[in-house]
Amino acid sequence: MDARAPLLRAAVGFCLVPPTEPELQLLHRWMDCWRGVGDVVTGMTRQGFEISLGDHGGQWIAVFYEGHGGYETLAAAGNAQAPTPWRAVQGAAWAALRKQPL
């Protein structure tokens, strides 16, 4: 993991907190959209993860994989299911990052 990993972990973790305070509302305006999905995916890619994201009958499923080479050598590191793509990506990223040492 590179030096930006703690910042990514903090941003994704705070996205899972309901936006009751102005600071969290600002974070959610940034992260709860397709731009936020792209930013999380970019950050996770820089940490060595690959993603699978798909809409399955109104539920989005995101899986982050770690490993290199072809898909046959990848291992699921974190996954989540949610009604929006950004919530699924945030949940899967959080699950994968929680397993990584600081």
Image (cartoon, grey):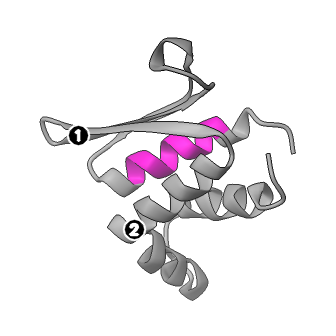
Q: Position of residue 22 (x, y in %)?
A: 55, 87
Residue 88: where, in percent of width, then height?
39, 46
Q: Is residue 5 left or right of residue 46?
A: right
At a point 49% along the width and 51% down the height, the residue shown is 90
Q: Is residue 37 above or below residue 56?
A: below
Residue 26 pos. (x, y %): 51, 84
- Residue 72 or 17: which is nearer the viewer? 72
Where's residue 13, x and y in %? Answer: 63, 56
Number of marks present in the image shown: 2
Is residue 14 shown above or below 64? Answer: below
Write the start and end of the magenta stretch as one range: 87-96
Tell me the tag on residue 100: none
Structural distance between the alpha carbons of marks 1 and 2: 16 Å
Is residue 93 magenta-colored?
yes
Query: Which amino acid, mark 1?
Result: Gln
Q: Is residue 54 magenta-colored?
A: no
Q: Residue at x 85, y 38 (%)?
A: 101
For disc 2, the marked residue is 32
Give the residue at x 55% y 19%.
74
Q: Is residue 102 left or right of residue 71?
A: right
